[in-house]
Amino acid sequence: MIMRAGVISMGSISSKWTADALKKYFDEADLLDIKEFEVNLGKEGGVLYAGKPLKHYDCLYMKGSGRYANLLRSIASMLNDKTFIPIRPSAFTTCHDKLLTHIALQKAKVPQPQTYIASTSVAAKKIIKKMTYPIVLKLPTGTHGKGVMLADSYESASSMIDALAVLKQPFLLQEYIETDSTDTRAFVVGDEVVASMKRIAVTGEKRANIHAGGRGEATELSAQAKKTALMAARALGAEICGVDMLESIRGPKVIEVNVSPGLQGITKATGVNVAEKLAKHLFERTKEFQREIESKSHKEVIPQIAPHKEMKEIIIKADFRGAKMLLPEIVTTETKLTEDDDIIIKMAKGKIEIDRIVSKDKKEKEE
């Protein structure tokens, strides 16, 4: 059987690396342009690519910016019962919203900086009176460090809040953790942190994101940091993701979970072939997923026989013809078994049970 994998993305270099690595494991591996996708809802609902129904893929790895978060979630929701997708549908929208991300981390008891949520300037100004400066202000959306501001006093924080209030959306107020303008990116694949790097901001910049000019260098995470990264990935339902953390005196604190992590920076910094590890994991998990599908299908074909409302008993002498045991005619009459039926025979010493196998289709016809 031909196994197909697809990478849905905006066509980045990282995505091309991933598609090339997948070709080592899958018979086909396609790079699919996210801008060509549509989700058709209604009587004839389905996922379309370039205006035509999307062909079947055994595995789909999907990436994209916040602009495509709802589309990615929709595609995953439509296909994840027949196609292996390593990211839970809800994660595409949750991870592109810092507010929802922090709530998910909170529910899973994942360590994170002390964070407050405010929706009005009045509420926010009450909160910042009790915070220790400097503090961090964040918009719910935004990637690569965009929408993140640092206030070193109540006055500056108050001015920023007035500006943010104009946008009429909630915003986050967060404790500042001093890390000498660095953070840590852990790349999670399945149950393992396959690569990790420390990101160092350029002079005069607090954001360590590589897209903001920062540079990366390989680092070995502590056991606690690895555990925290895996906890965060599980909390969001992402088997493949980048987990960003700050190393505080109280241990690692998660600040973001990225379900569309780039490969260039971490591959260059660590020398680890992350695309290869990612592709191998997708192949192995796809095979597991297919076995689960087959097992589920088998159970539908052979459902458990419901207990009989009334069982009749007879006492007879066992009738053997050589090594074969024959049953009296009344057994055939009462059970309604015919030569066209498939049966399950359960046997043990001194005991035998016979059940008819009823396929899903046959059961529906009988009902």
Image: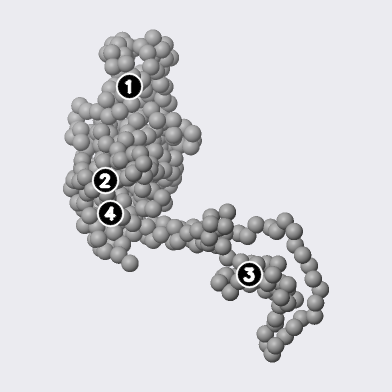
The nearer-to-camera label among 3 and 4 is 3
Quadrant of residue 332 within the rendered picture: bottom right
Determine whether label 1 and label 2 are within 8 Å by CB.
no
Q: Earlier in the sequence, mark 3 or mark 2?
A: 2
Above or below, 40 against 27 in this view is: above
Taking 274 as reference, is 302 left or right?
A: right
Q: Residues within 10 Å of mark 2 (few under 14, many from 20)?
A: some
Q: Which residue is mark 1?
A: 137
Three-letter code, disc 3? Leu
Q: Which residue is mark 2?
A: 48
Under circle 2, the secondary element is strand
Q: Residue furthest right?
A: 315
Determine whether label 4 and label 2 are within 8 Å by CB.
no
Q: Which residue is mark 4?
A: 55
Under circle 3, the secondary element is loop
Under circle 4, the secondary element is loop
Q: Toward the viewer: 284 or 123?
A: 284
